[in-house]
Amino acid sequence: LSDRLAARGSVVPLGLVSNNWGGTKLEMWAPATVFDECGVSPPPQPLGGPMWNAMILPYAAGPMALSGFVWYQGEADTATTATAALYRCTFPKMIGAWRDAFRQPTAFFGFVQLSTWCGGGELAEALPAMRDAQMGAAALHGVAYATNADHGMGCAIHPAFKRPVAERLATAALAVRYNESVRWRSPRYVTAEQTTPQAEGTVTVEISLRDVSPAGLHLRRPFNYFSPGYAAAAPVAVDCTGSTPVSPTANVSMALMCAWASLLVDGVGWLNASAEATAGGRTLLLSAVLPVRTSSAARVLATSYGYGPIPMLSAYDAGTNLPVLPWNTTLSMATWAQPPYAPATTATQPP
């Protein structure tokens, strides 16, 4: 970011204050009022979180001048779908509390949409729900995001390859904080419409997206399909048909962790789908093969794309190299559907 600002003629030095504590929940970084406003009584930290009191408020004395904040957190809050739902409220409230403390109501705030890891319990549903909950804060003025959902390390919670998300955050800051005309948003789901099948015995849905650049979409092998090779180690394909240990006494099916594109068909259930860029790269076409003896008039109820702990994202904006963000919703967008995330009997490998 500093180099890109210098190229514009800026002579103001850019500094970062690294202020972090691993494995902490949002409640540790927020005042008690955040939870009061979200209907949690009593708040988990009645006097405010210890990091809020010891690591945020001291900088607000004066207050210290700053241009904005960067936030990479949320794993510790991803226990259940209920904790993810609470985060949808507390996260924007915390952003507001930080801005108020520094007396900068529109200070830039950039956050990272969570990467990949594996676990038991509700993680298959909770992690994608948390990514959705994070995105609720993007509606606030001066807030930007950068997804790291497509550059994980399989089941490892700390991805080592951080350059892509750092570059995305820098680009977002250039656009939102420094008013540079650059595209920083990932393409996102808008609507879906069932269309005429491309072939007999299939169902097809066309997905409309927003924030697609004029260059359109292109498809590639998902980055998450391989655990990146570091040093002399060669990349290793993620085995979406096996299992992985999540405790000393339990394994979890990787079919529950890997998430591809799928369609929910009335009377049939979830079917894995292939993706294709259409309409000059402006939309996505998802197609699935119907089981034998299924009516050709089968109705698609919902679509899902990369909606799981390890999103297998294959659709990218050719102009920005940003991935289409995961989604899981009915065709009417009236309610969220809950698929059996890539069940083992239908786990699909990329071509």
Image (spheres, helix red, strand yellow):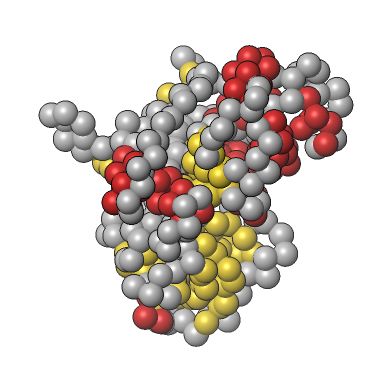
Residue 280 in percent (x, y) is at 37, 80
- Residue at 39% x, 40% y is 12
Residue 152 in percent (x, y) is at 37, 39
Q: In this view, does 119 lie to the left or right of 244?
A: right
Give residue 191's quadrant in the image: bottom right
- Residue at 46% x, 81% y is 197
Relative vertical location of residue 320 with respect to residue 307 in this rendering, above or below: below
The one of 134 and 208 positioned closer to us in this rendering: 134
Give residue 11's quadrant in the image: top left
Q: Is residue 180 left or right of residue 103?
A: left
The one of 283 and 270 positioned closer to us in this rendering: 283
For the N terminus, which image quadrant?
top left
For the C terminus, which image quadrant?
bottom left
Relative vertical location of residue 247 with respect to residue 175 in this rendering, above or below: above
- Residue at 58% x, 81% y is 297
Residue 160 in percent (x, y) is at 32, 31
- Residue at 46% x, 48% y is 173
The one of 27 and 259 positioned closer to us in this rendering: 27
Q: Does residue 27 appear in this view?
A: yes
Give residue 87's quadrant in the image: top right
Q: In this view, does 231 lie to the left or right of 59?
A: left
Q: In this view, does 104 lie to the left or right of 236?
A: right
